[in-house]
Amino acid sequence: MMEPVPALDLAALDPEQAAAVRAPRGPVCVLAGAGTGKTRTITYRIAHLVSEGHVKADQVLAVTFTARAAGEMRARLRALGLGGDATQVQARTFHAAALRQLKYFWPQVVGDVPWRLLDSKFPIVAQAANRVGLSSATDSVRDLLSEIEWAKAALVAPEDYPATVAKLRRETPYDAMRVAQVYAGYEKLKSTPDGLLLDFDDLLLHTAAALEDFPSVADEFRGRYRSFVVDEYQDVTPLQQRVLDAWLGERDDLTVVGDANQTIYSFTGATPTFLLDFSRRFPEATVVRLERDYRSTPQLVSLANRVIGMARGRIAGTRLQLIGQRPDGVEPTFREYDDAPAEAAAVAAAIKRLIAEGTPAAEIAVLYRINAQSEGYEQALTERGIPFQVRGGEGFFTRAEVRQAVLALRKTEAREDLPAPARRGAALITLVRATLSAHGLTTEEPAGAQARERREAMVALVRLTEELVEHDGELDLTGLLRELAARAEARHPPTVQGVTLASLHAAKGLEWDAVFLTGLSDGTLPIAHVLSSDMSVADEAALEEERRLLYVGVTRAREHLRLSWSLARNEGGKRSRRRSRFLNGLVPDDSPASRIANSVPQRGATRERPTCRVCAKPLIGTYATMLGRCRRCPAELDAELLAALQEWRTEKAEELRAREFVIFTDTTLTAIAEQLPADDAALTAIPGIGAKKLEQYGAEVLAIVGSRLRASPKTD
């Protein structure tokens, strides 16, 4: 029998939070800005629904997007007397909830066909790529894997992939037909003589199908769960929404929480459409806006509001005007450097000063747009003896010692002499320590850099185990290994005590006392591929997502924020970069960094746009700009030349061990096959082909074009 829920002190909530908590049972949409206490609001709402008798605790399913967020929600629910054993509120990720349900319903739906969860998709995608003649190099397979994940999240089948990406004008790493072949091959290879292999997206697909196609399964599930809460609703994919719809059926007891202005994962298939359309789907929904920011100082809140205040488009119409609730702090600072090494050195020096002044290293973060930017900061911090961890990048789970440690834990799991109590809860921590002691986990710091790195990795695994057990006292070794596999798939390493280096995407949902936003130059933020060759806007929607990345970065800081950029990539290099266009109007006039000229014309200024070579109208969008013509304007395509160029690109990629689209995208090759450039000037007139590409590949491309023209001369 569940103990009664303790009385809730709603006086501890602000008026808007209390309104969300007290909203009647039914559809509720909470638009929650950064730092406005959304997790507190969610957990109090669940507790209120239970304490008022609207729903039983074990009939509530709360879902979020990361194991860390689910763990935090469980901890807060426990504090309110609602989280813990199986008779109480369940707080899980979409995938963890689907896995639990699928295990239960599988015999009713599929029968005795065995299945297991894939530890890694990589080997199967590599095998599928090999079968269609594509490279199985790491970067190539990773690009293909990302496309497959996007397609499944967007509910795009292999046979529909080419048409869908063409309609969306989505850049693909290879020709869309070949990607579709790899996708289809991957799905086929998961059916083995020993049963089915399921990836994380399959968990969702099978769960949705079970509820949609089997009324008895749907009835049993809907009798079990009656109320649903979804966190970070702006990040839901069509596949996750399909599962949520299957869970709900015809009911409407749904609370969603999100902020469309923190939508930064559209490349994975996530879309804010479901959040933006919530009131349209549920006209009677209660909508509450949380705008009181308890995280950042008013100075940082003001900057965040100014960053997002410049946004345009439908998402911008939902923007929240954050109101700082903390005492005044220091103003954010802006810094410009001659080159990237100088920027990294200055950031490391500033971090050392902050640590000396009392800011813990673990409360400091260096954020950047792409993972490749971390190297300079790793070096600069190492030179100053400052500990750090790289979050969301390559490294931890691909390191040999970590792979060996995970393998050792799997061998321990397979032992038959270990009783269940020795594998669960606090005993699990002891078991993990014992297993890893043979792989570098020592009680004292060893001599030698490699031995220390190995020990640090083992300590990180133990700390991660402790953290997970703290959130789930019944966690067993099987569950731990599943969590490690999920983190490896998501490149989500455990936490160590040091400065965090992370991409802006990996920083979402986290916060630090001090944040350094680095590398803020045009072509990096916003990233180059959303811009046309003259650095003007080529894709407005993608540009706005880049702006939201900056907004997310700014809102990660509690007290100290420094924004910086450099004018050259290499030490002493040509200072050809410009600061990010997103900083225009934000850098104070009295800042030393304000001396730089604006990188792009201000809004409302005249800007010459490239025009269509067929109809002479201004070109709109990346695809049209790259081809030099409007999408609907007719053009002659030399199909044989295009095939020859694609074959050359494949050979060149293998020779250079590079991804094909890094050499030339499909769109660029199409433009060449349409325009038939005869000299250097004509070739570089095609967007995407600059001086560097001309130097690297120009002679070979022109030779292929010339050979084709000689073989098939045109007549007037």
Image: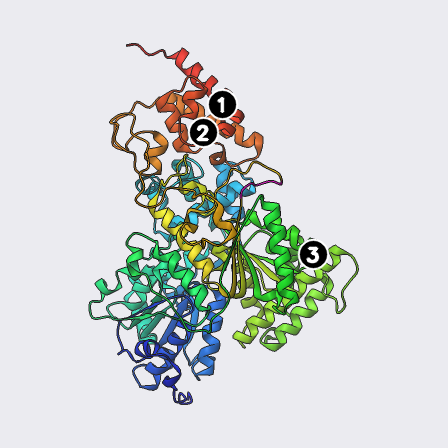
- Indicate the secondary structure of the residue bearing disc 2: loop
**In the current view of this chain or complex, which residue is farthest to the front?**
590
Tell me whether circle 1 and circle 2 mark residues in contact (CB < 8 Å): yes
Residue placed furthest toward the left: 283
- Give the residue type at disc 1: Gly
Q: Is residue 569 magenta?
A: yes
Between residues 499 and 603, which one lies in front from this camera angle?
603
Label 1 to label 2: alpha-carbon separation: 9 Å
Residue 505, given in percent of the width and then of the height, sits at 47, 55
Q: How many marks?
A: 3
User: Which of marks 1 and 3 precedes in the sequence?
Assistant: 3
Q: Which mark is residue 689?
A: 2
Q: Which residue is mark 1?
A: 698
Q: What crowding class fits label 2: few (fewer than 14 Cα within 10 Å), some (14-19), or many (20 or more)? A: some
Task: State the extent of the magenta-drawn residues as a range.
Answer: 567-571
Can residue 218 be found in the magenta stretch? no
Q: CA distance from mark 3 to mark 1?
A: 44 Å
Residue 384: which numbered mark, if any?
3
Image quarter for residue 419? bottom right
**Residue at 38 percent of width and 58 percent of height:** 306
Drawn side of residue 709 relative to residue 561, left or right: left
Residue 511 appears in view: no
In this rendering, the answer to whether 602 lies above or below 693 is below
Amino acid at dot 3: Arg
Q: Residues within 10 Å of mark 1 (few under 14, many from 20)?
A: some
Q: Nearer the viewer, residue 624 or 111?
A: 624
**Does 372 sit above or below residue 204?**
above
**Residue depicted at 63% across the width and 56% down the height:** 348
Q: Position of residue 517 (x, y in %)?
A: 51, 55
Q: Earlier in the sequence, mark 1 or mark 2?
A: 2
Q: Residue at x 50, y 30 (%)?
A: 650
Q: Earlier in the sequence, mark 3 or mark 2?
A: 3
